[in-house]
Image (cartoon, rainbow, N blue to C red):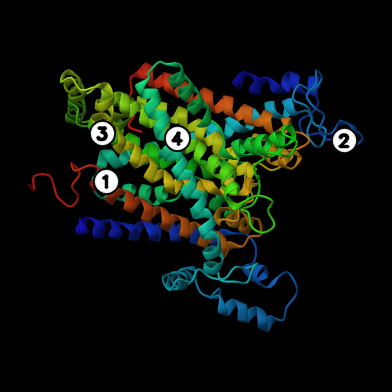
Amino acid sequence: MLAYIGKRILQFIPVFIGVTLILFFFRAVVPGDPIKLIAGEKAMPDAIYEQIVKANHLDQPIYVQYGYYMKDLFHGDLGTSYQRKTPVVDIFAKKLPYSARLALCAILLEILLGISAGIISAVKRYSFIDALVTVSTAALISVPAFWLGMMLQMFFGIFLKDATGGVFALPISGAGGPTSDFPTWMHYILPATTLAAVSLAYTARIMRSQLLEVLNADYIRTALAKGLSRRAVIIKHALKNAMIPVITFIGIDFGVMISSAILTETVFNWPGIGSEIVRAIGQRDWPIVMGGVILIVVLIMLINLIVDVSYAAFDPRIRYGKKAGDE
Amino acid sequence: MILVALSADLWAPRLLGSPTFIDTTMTTTMSKMPPSLEHPFGTDSLGRDELVRIIYGARISLSVGVLAMSISLLIGMVLGTTAAYFGGIWDSIIMRATDIFMAFPYVLFAIALLAALGPSFVNMFIAIGIIGWTSIARVIRSIILQVKENDYVSAARALGASNLRIILRHVLPNSLAPVVVYATMGIGTAIISEAALSFLGLGIQPPTPSWGLMIADAQQYMVIAPWLIFAPGLAILLTVLSFTLLGDGLRDAMDVKMTD
């Protein structure tokens, strides 16, 4: 097991170098003079200009610049924001908890609603509920999440507010705090639902098809023939085996969620990593864009590792670090 | 949908007005009109008919979807086929490359690329196309690994056929079905990506009508003109849904077993 974890961490290295190289290449082709972005558009003495060039190693060849960037990166330094003049790490340290909490809420929704919808529609195949789940999940995966978010904003924030005379509404912007009229937890409802929606639909579909497949297996027929109730068979025998691909999907999806949160956070004005990256793109604040993307990529790699390792806990048939025929 | 988009130039402007032309004398009175007989989906903030913009937006979305998918297909097929066929170091290099690209979240890569290159129509479908190739390459690689073990491939080689000829004549035609299914569904994904990127201001630039951009424009008028958000979203939903269903249908017709 330990050997497997070690091997996976070693596999990170080429991926990580590749990702940073690609990003660095992007930075190199960004139009515009970075000095102007750092110091503003105002005219400045040549001496100061030279000083900024030296301080940022911009007089060196690009591969040397990359070396400096990587050196700083391993010291936990992602550079300084052009616009905010504060270290990128500090900015993201403030934003990360918001993004993480939102993603966690969305994952919980995905697990609870997605899995139960999938189970119900598989067990009651061809029923009305099954048709409803199939049609609504097909619609959900065909819709851009940001549009769905706006629809929710319009329904819960505007339509319901008008319809109930202002008695009931859900907050549609921001993450709460002293200036908000709503308790903080209410601010999570709509963004988390939006973020979860597409993944939830995929989860339900995978759960349904897996369970249907497993229910056709011989050992299920054996268990039923033994006289066990259908309920017991589904819960004890079928679910356990149908769950594995679903868990795989949810694990991979956690990473996708963090990045697709960029759109959700923009729609709901959520103070997370995603909306910070979007802001930075608008202002050509490249250290933030680059730092944010690297941060998300590293997060995703870590989550994938945790998911892979935790398989062994769910499925005793999976043994890592052993080659076939080692037994 | 495709028919409507292709024929739009013939009839739409006469009936409903130009999709980009802004009649400045009319903007105040025509702005944000609710749906009516004359303008079935209402008019937008600059007094342009929403339906005509959606029709022209279909051209953008469909062409981005198809072009981006073609790029993905081209890169994915060439790299996937050669990786599987030649194996060895070339195979490992390409598989590591897909690892790197897959570590990038889908949206994030396109955002970073477009932030660097600047938003434009061409940059956008390149960005979307470049992210899509990895899964195609993996799908085709896994199929070709099976196909190339077949006897007819050995037979062709024994007859002295060149590598290129074996790949093009014998291996590829027998591996295409899943790729076609995958590509059809991929067009839908590409259309959603286009909408998302345009929504963030990184894709299509105004005044060209794009569904994502129209939604972004309408966001600030959510309270007074909700139909402006609703209509383009519905257009995306129907288009993507038709590609998904088409993919489903092709999959059943060609009896392809998909793993994901």
- Marks 2/4: CA distance? 46 Å
Q: Nearer the viewer, residue A318 or B195?
A: A318
Q: Amino acid at mark 4?
A: Leu
Which of the two discs, 4 and 3, sits closer to the camera? 4
Q: Quadrant of the N terminus of chain A?
A: bottom left
Q: Residues within 10 Å of mark 4 (few under 14, many from 20)?
A: some
Give the residue at mark 1: A311
Q: Amino acid at mark 1?
A: Tyr
Residue at 25%, 27% (x, y): give it. Answer: A232
Tell me the SS state at disc 4.
Answer: helix
Q: Which badge, 4 or 3, is on the more N-terminal residue? A: 4
- Identify whether A285 is placed above or below B71: below
Q: Nearer the viewer, residue A242 or A319?
A: A242
* Alpha-carbon span between mark 1 and mark 2: 60 Å
Q: Residue at x 44, y 24 (%)?
A: B247
Quarter where residue B156 is shown = top left
Depth check, mark 2 against mark 4: the one in front is: 4
Q: Earlier in the sequence, mark 3 or mark 1?
A: 3
| Distance between mark 4 and mark 3 Cα atoms | 19 Å
- Residue for badge 3: A241
Q: Are marks 3 and 2 on the same chain?
A: no
Q: Looking at the picture, how far across and down is residue A98, in whole percent?
A: 54, 56
Identify the residue under disc 2: B27
| Residue mark closest to the camera, 1 vs 2 | 1
**Circle 1 SS class:** helix
State the CA–CA distance, disc 3 to disc 2.
61 Å
Q: Chain of mark 4?
A: A
Q: Earlier in the sequence, mark 1 or mark 4?
A: 4
Q: Which residue is mark 4?
A: A113
Q: Are marks 1 and 4 on the same chain?
A: yes
Q: CA distance from mark 3 to mark 1?
A: 12 Å
Circle 1 marks a residue in which chain? A
